[in-house]
Image: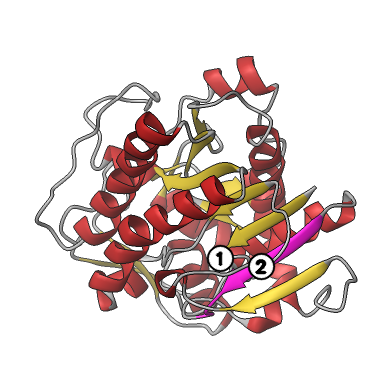
Amino acid sequence: MRFLIAGGGGFIGSHLSEKLLKKGHKVVAVDNFCSSSRKNIEGFKEHENFNVVEEDILNGVSIEGEIDYVLHFASRASPKNYQEHPLHTLRTNTEGTLKMCRLADNKNAKLLYASTSEVYGDPEKHPQTEDYWGNVNPHGPRSCYDEGKRAGEATLRSYSEKNNLDYRIIRIFNTYGPRMMKNDGRVVTNFMRQAKNGKPITVYGDGTQTRSFCYIEDLVAGIIKSTESENGKVYNLGNPEEHTINELAEKIKDLTGSDSQIVHRELPQDDPLRRKPDISKAKRELGWEPETGLSEGLEKTLKAF
């Protein structure tokens, strides 16, 4: 098949591009590289079935020939990055999503939208299931991303009701691995950079808040399985192993052999206190679940780092 991946040069998009190429598919990666690196695609950019269109989806994307599947991963995703560019982030997930719907519709293609666990906000339900509506601040510092993704989901639903678009949605929980931007401000890269440089490891809040970390190879396997799902389906994709931020800091200290001190700073506004996906739906309907434990995944990430 021929896949168009919006955000195909990003952290997740590049791994997904590479995997689809290995499976024998054709890939058109659309990316403006505003929050990613061209180095992500160095290893396969000359592949005969791979093409790059350097463009912002907000400007529209013109692609010749047939497209079987549109995978919409275009968006700034780290809090540091999207809070520096809030309007662009919001527009990418609203206007950009509408443009991807129209593109898929015009090409008679299926569409998969990469949403996020942030649609659940600071959840009052734990673990989070796909039928939970969330607890999101619509007027906070994270709203450009949280509400942008929620609006993106609503865009797919609304467009489909009028145009019978064949779509599905994945809600991605914290993912890590090679090709993450080292200065993106996310917790895994922050801790690794600080530990390897002998700097204090900065934990925001008291460190008892939790996250569930999914290794990139596991996530990509789940994404590919999701492309085969039925129209209108929504799936949580993440690792249900829950870890405190303090645990993560200690693990990275041990793996790097660092003697960095762990220091605590004020917790940012609206930062979720607990995050854990219920993936029973994906296990039941897709036959998918992650296989990589946190220590193994962190070791692989450190080698690439």
Residue extending furthest top?
284
Q: Is residue 295 above or below residue 76?
A: above
Helix or strand or loop: what does disc 1 sit on?
Answer: loop
Residue type highlighted by circle 2? Ala
Q: Is residue 191 left or right of residue 138?
A: right
Residue 205 versus residue 263: which sits nearer the camera? 205
Q: Position of residue 245 (x, y in %)?
A: 40, 52
Disc 1: CA contacts within 10 A as few (<14), some (14-19) or many (>=20): many
Q: Is residue 284 left or right of residue 57?
A: right
The residue depicted at 62 percent of the width and 17 percent of the height is: 285
Which color scheme is applied? secondary structure
Helix or strand or loop: what does disc 2 sit on?
Answer: strand
Disc 2: CA contacts within 10 A as few (<14), some (14-19) or many (>=20): many
Residue type highlighted by circle 1? Gly
Please identify the quarter of the rendering in which residue 237 is found.
Answer: top right
Q: Is residue 260 left or right of residue 287?
A: left
Q: First in sequence: mark 2 or mark 1? A: 1
Q: Which mark is residue 29?
A: 2
Q: Is residue 254 in view from this perspective?
A: no
The C terminus is located in which quarter? bottom right
Q: Which residue is mark 1?
A: 7
Determine contact: label 2, label 1, CB under 8 Å.
no
The stretch of residues the image draws in magenta is 26-33
Q: Position of residue 44 (x, y in %)?
A: 83, 73
Q: Which mark is residue 85?
A: none
Residue 236 versus residue 161: which sits nearer the camera? 161
Q: How many angstroms separate mark 2 from mark 1 (CA)? A: 7 Å
Q: Is residue 114 in view from this perspective?
A: yes
The residue depicted at 25 percent of the width and 28 percent of the height is: 133
